[in-house]
Amino acid sequence: MQANSRVPSSAQTGIHEQLATLLDRHRHAPFLKPYADYNRVACEASLARHQRIAPHAPLILDACCGVGESSIALARAFPDHYVIGVDQSASRLARNIDGKADGLPENLDLVRADLVDYWRLLRDAGVRLDRHYLLYPNPWPKIGHLARRWHGHPVFPAMLALGGVLECRSNWAIYVEEMARAITLATGRDVVVEAYAPEPTQVLTPFERKYLASGHALSRLRVALP
């Protein structure tokens, strides 16, 4: 397979100089955006299904799961866990892919919701994750886009509050390095960023497959959150 995807282009050459200031602002100003009703319904339904299908199974959240390829792979790789894949696009979630041909694994739920609400609703419900995946989120690479990146967004403290082993991958190394610094500033945990080159059989998402085929260097962090 060959591809010609581009690495994100940015005038930013390192961790954003305003990162610490922005995180401090979010710590001292609670994020009070009202929840959308459809997100409340989606979260309640997904948690109810978890309790009905596998109430004692540890929970994995696949955030920004797109077409659900990564969520299906995770559900099969961790059969003793319950996986929730969340994406805000109903059309992406409904798209036919090879892994859906024989039906979804029983321990998987694909949910259409906005993560800005869904993460906070999970936190409010007292949910604690076992594993949490952020696979190739939109990098928002322009210097002025810091507040649009997940670690620069006011929802970031709620995301961290869910705990578990957080894994983030990107083809823009600065994004992962910046998130690692943000996690350290917020929690005091040391976070290691490493180069990541999965075998073809280990690829989790269409983006990962495309970036590898385009010759991109991938970066990854994994950290056990408090």
Image (cartoon, helix red, strand yellow):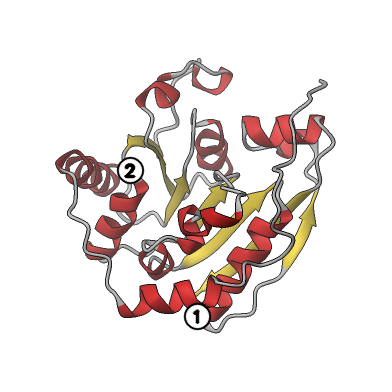
Spatial CA distance of label 2 from label 1 is 25 Å
Residue most extreme to the bottom: 188
Q: Amino acid at mark 1?
A: Thr
Return the residue nearer the eye: 57 or 39: 39
Residue 190 in the figure: left or right of residue 183 = right
Residue 184 position in % (x across, y down): 57, 78
Position of residue 24 measured from the top left corner of the image (x, y, whole percent)? 43, 79
Q: Which residue does the image show at 79% across and 35% down from the upper left? A: 212
**Which mark, by number, is residue 107?**
none
Residue 193: percent from the left, percent from the top? 72, 65
Q: Amino acid at mark 2?
A: Asp
| Label 2 close to label 1 by CB (< 8 Å) | no
The quadrant where residue 46 appears:
top left
Q: Quadrant of the N terminus?
A: top right
From the viewer's perspective, is residue 3 above or below residue 157? above
**Residue 34 drawn at (x, y percent):** 17, 54
- Nearer the observer, 141 or 169: 141
Does residue 33 appear in the picture of this structure? yes
Q: Which residue is mark 1?
A: 187
Q: Earlier in the sequence, mark 2 or mark 1?
A: 2
Under tag 2, what secondary structure? loop
SS under mark 1: helix
Mark 2: few, some, or many residues within 10 Å (few <14, many ≥20)?
Answer: some
Q: Is residue 49 above or below residue 158?
A: above
Look at mark 2 in the image and give the residue it sits on: 114
Please state the total of marks drawn on the protein image.
2
Q: Residue at x 19, y 38 (%)?
A: 38
Look at 55% across and 71% down and name the residue there: 19
Q: Nearer the viewer, residue 131 or 124?
A: 124
